[in-house]
Structures are given as structure tokens and as C-alpha cells.
Amino acid sequence: MNKLKILIWNIKEIFRISNFRRDKSSVLFGAWFGEKFADNPRFLFQYLSDNKEKLGLTHVVWVTRNEQVCRTLNKMGYESYMMDSEKSIYYHRTAGVHIICNGANDDFSDPHADILGRYSTGAVKINLWHGLCGIKGFGFLSNEYIEFKKYHPFKAWLKESIHRIGILRKLIVSPGGWGDCYFLSTTPYVTMLFKKINLLPEKNFILSGYPRNCINIRLSDEEKKLISRLGAYKFKILYLPTFRDNSDDYSAPLECENVRKWLSENSDVLWIEKGHSADKLSMLSFDSSLSNVIRLDSNFEINILLPHTDILVSDYSSVIFEALYHNKPVMYYVPDLDYYKNHDRGFLNDPDFFMTGKRVYDGEQIVACLTEEKQHKGYVNNENYKQIKKQFWGAEKNIDLIWKDICQHCRIRNK
């Protein structure tokens, strides 16, 4: 978006907010560009909603662009509104705390941020984020930006300078002042990576746990139905690939005939897969008719499913860290490892550092690895696994302590 347009809007908002009173006992939530009820905001939203009186909160509101999400939440007894409704705008203007997990760069011509971030001026703005960083390069550490900086050093210097100066971050980077928001981080190491990625200062980072690892929440009817199905299988595999900018060197596991054959011969095995929300290349292109294969909608909340599975199959997705948190073994299916490292998103760390399990590159290796893992049934005895888990997760915290950490850091009154 044009930076001058952002600046003019933000200056106008500074004067407009005098007509509204921000109430920090009112909390506004959104996630995944307004399309999903998921991730860290979902788990914190449900905790705050179910404990409003105890925590001294008056309103805990979820806004969405997805009518099904809105209906489901209202049916569950939660307060939810469609993004552009009158009620939504009212809470955007009056809620004292705004919480998201992904995008806040609210483009006026094509709004697709988690909430209407343009109305966040004067609110405490918190980005809980949607995945631990430590794998893919993004932001100021992406391959794309490094290449841009190489050929346009002055423009890169100017861009970085804007992000390093507090008042400019608030006024120019994003509508509503989201350029200077708080970020939730899990360890000093993760904070160090985030600081390099978005150039925010140390004071902007809240050191705590991730709400989505606190899975004791109310489930939707659809989620309950799926969890109940799992008991019929002895070995449950969850396949979650990340998105790619190019898929020429990649083929999905179920496109391998020997993988399909192995699944057909092992009726006590369940294969569950879900594509990434940002996937535009059909990473799950094979349409399997096998009865023990489930393909989830891209909006399904995998964090409530992961503890019930026996192994994660993934690649460069940060979900591998969620598996470590729950002590689940990980198999890395990475047929395009070299291409991804050098020509796609690139990595923040060497794969030898963050890949704690076996790497496989074709269907034959997938079958061999899964056959072995089925025998061990989720047993993990790997020093590198334990080291990486500690480096990215730190001390385990329940959701009550996480909210207290957020309130203390952001100076939100908490009972």
C-alpha cells in the first residue's frame, strides 16, 4: 500500500479516536485473514470468553469474513460478528485490546487482514503469530528481500530505517499503527530471530508460551466427530506440507504407488492430511479413494488433532515444532530440499539444525520409515530432538500464565 496513504490515514485516526473510548476490558480477536477460527487467537479467545467474569472482562469478540465461522461461534455461545457489520466496527473502535496471528496490513482497496487493522489506533495491538520462526526465511531475512537489497541498497536502507524508528513504524508501516505492535515469542532464541525478521526492538516481544498448545478447550461438533473416529486405528499419521512458490521438484506422498499400496495393506493405519492455507500449487494433488485416508479442509484446526496422532510427516513447516512440543516423532519428506533452500523461500537455519528425525525423498523411503515407526509407536530417543525442543519452547506454561504474561508486558489490568 502507498506509504503516503497510510500516513494520512493514521494521522486522521489520531484525531478521530478522541470520539471513542478504548476499554481494555473489551478484547477483539481475528485470525488468518478473517477466514478461520484457528491458531493462537482461537485458544486464547476461548479461554478469555469462558473466564470473562474471573478475569474482569466485559466483551471478548471474534470478527470474521467467513459466515460459517460466525454461525459456529454463535452456536457455541461466543460473541462473533461478520467483519464489516455495524457491531464489528463498533468493537474495532472501542475494544482496548486487538489480537491477531497473521496479517494486519489492512489494504483499503483489498482488505484481507485478520481484522480491520485501520481501526486499531489507540488499542493495545498484539500479534500472537501463527508459527514459530526458525525454518523458512521471511520478512527481512527472506531470499526475496536479500536479493532486493543486493540490487537496491538505498531503497533497502530506507525501508529498514523506517522499521527501526518507533514513530515511523507507527505512522507509515501499516494502518492503525500495527507496524509497532507487540509480538508473542517463546524463548530468547526465537525473539532473536523475530527481531532480525521484522526489526522490532526487544521491548515489543512478550516472552511466554503459545496458547494453541493448551488444548483443553471446547470443540466444535465437526472436531468432536473427527476425534471420535481416531480410536478405530492403531497408527495415525498426520501429513502437513508447507506452501511453496514452485512445485516442479515435488510430488505428494500419495502420488507414490507404493505408499498407496502400503496404506491399502495396513487397514489399522490412518493417513490424515491437510494443505497449507497459503498453498496455491495443490500440494495434495492426488485424490485418494482409500477408506483410511482423510483429507481435511484447509481451515481445520490441527492443534487439537496433533496430540491424538502418532507421527507427523512434514517438510519445512513450523508445525514440526508443535510435534516436538507434544513429544511426537517427525518424518521429513523433502524431495525438493535443495531447490527450496536455494531458489524458493530459503532457510533461517541449516536443515541439519532443525530436522530432528529421518529425511525421506521418495515413496519407497516413506514406506520403510513408516513401517519402522509403526513398530516403535511414537517412541522418541534423540538428543537433538530434546535440544531443539528446549531451544524453541523453553518452560511449559498453561494458558492462565500466558495471559498473565501478556497483561503484565502490555500493561493490561488483569484480576
Image: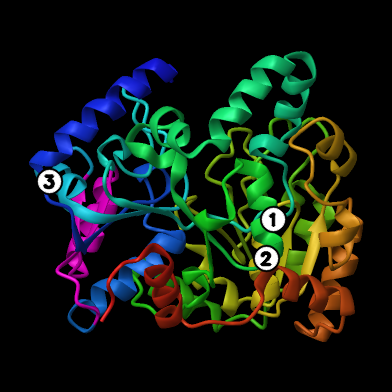
Relative to 137, 14 lies left or right: left
Q: Residue at x 37, y 44 (%)?
A: 114
The answer to whether residue 377 is above or below residue 48 is below
Q: Position of residue 274 (x, y in %)?
A: 57, 54
Locate the N terminus by quadrant: top left
Q: Position of residue 272 (x, y in %)?
A: 61, 63
How far is disc 3 from disc 2 in space, using C-alphas? 37 Å
Relative to 408, 129 lies left or right: right
- Disc 2 designates what residue? 188
Q: Which amino acid does label 1 sit on?
A: Met
- Residue 40 lies in quadrant: bottom left
Mark carried by residue 37: none
Work out whether mark 3 precedes mark 2 in sequence or the reverse, and give the earlier one: 3
Under circle 1, the secondary element is helix
The boundaries of the magenta stretch are 55-82
- Disc 3 designates what residue? 90
Q: Position of residue 43 (x, y in %)?
A: 40, 69
Locate the C terminus by quadrant: bottom left
Does the magenta-highlighted stretch encompass residue 61? yes
> Looking at the image, which is closer to me, 413 or 38?
413
Does the magenta-highlighted stretch encompass residue 108? no
The answer to whether residue 89 is above or below residue 160 is below
Under circle 2, the secondary element is helix
How far is disc 2 from disc 1 in space, using C-alphas? 6 Å
Q: Which amino acid does label 3 sit on?
A: Tyr
The answer to whether residue 309 is above or below residue 42 is below
Question: Are circles 2 and 1 on residues that touch, CB within 8 Å?
Answer: yes
- Disc 1 designates what residue? 192
- Its colouring scheme is rainbow
